[in-house]
Amino acid sequence: MRATAPERTRLDGAIEDLDGALDHTRPERIRAATADPTSTLWTTLGPPPRTPGALAAWRGLAVQLEAWNDKPPATDEWIDRMLGEPTHPSLGRRPGREGREAWNRLAVLLDNWGPIMAAAERLDPHSAAMAPEPMTWQRALDTAAESAEAREVGAANRADDFGLSL
């Protein structure tokens, strides 16, 4: 252990540098993907929308996907097979304890992307959440997701009022 300590320290530093560089360049990579039809983000999320609210929400989810793809948590495939852990077409197999919460959140967002995008289309283009800055992208996504959820709950409640179940 002592003999390899300097090399392990050097490698740990290199990993931290790479992680920092990925974090630093992520907003620019998202902006570039917005104009690149060959981007995997277009395949996963569809083409970037034209309205400011929807574009901000698209970029908010894109940031999360890029962060996931930049450094997905390690999975224990043997345990996953034994437990029958679910998989997602865009995220792969759900990881063990570490990373599970992020995987679950991304899976829910991706699985409900249609209603979230529809809600994002209705966001006020003059809202502070729509500024073209990376720090507002997440806020736009959260606002659209909450709005989509509220509409879904409202529709379910109205259906219950009429004795219908969806």
Image (spheres, helix red, strand yellow):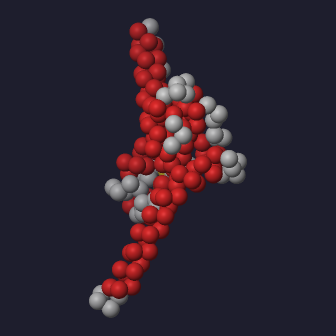
Question: Which picture quadrant has residue 104?
Answer: top left
- Residue 59 vertical placement versus 128 (above, below): below
Q: Which quadrant: the N terminus?
A: bottom left
Image x and y of residue 34, in percent: 64, 46
Name the residue located 47 percent from the left edge and 40 percent from the top edge.
136
**Residue placed most toward the observer, 165 or 97:** 97
**In the depicted view, which residue is nearer to us: 86 or 10?**
10
Q: Measuring from the top left, give residue 72's x and y in whole percent.
A: 46, 59
Q: Position of residue 16 (x, y in %)?
A: 41, 69
Residue under the image location 55 percent in, 32 percent down: 53
Give the residue displayed 60% in from the left and 45% down from the top.
44
Q: Residue furthest top?
A: 162
Viewer can see residue 163: no
In the image, 153: left or right of 50? left
Residue 26 is at least partly visible in this image = yes
Q: Is residue 32 above or below residue 133?
A: below
| Residue at left offset 55%, top offset 43% | 59
Task: Pinpoint residue 88: horizontal percent, then vertical percent.
Answer: 51, 48
Q: Residue furthest bottom?
A: 3
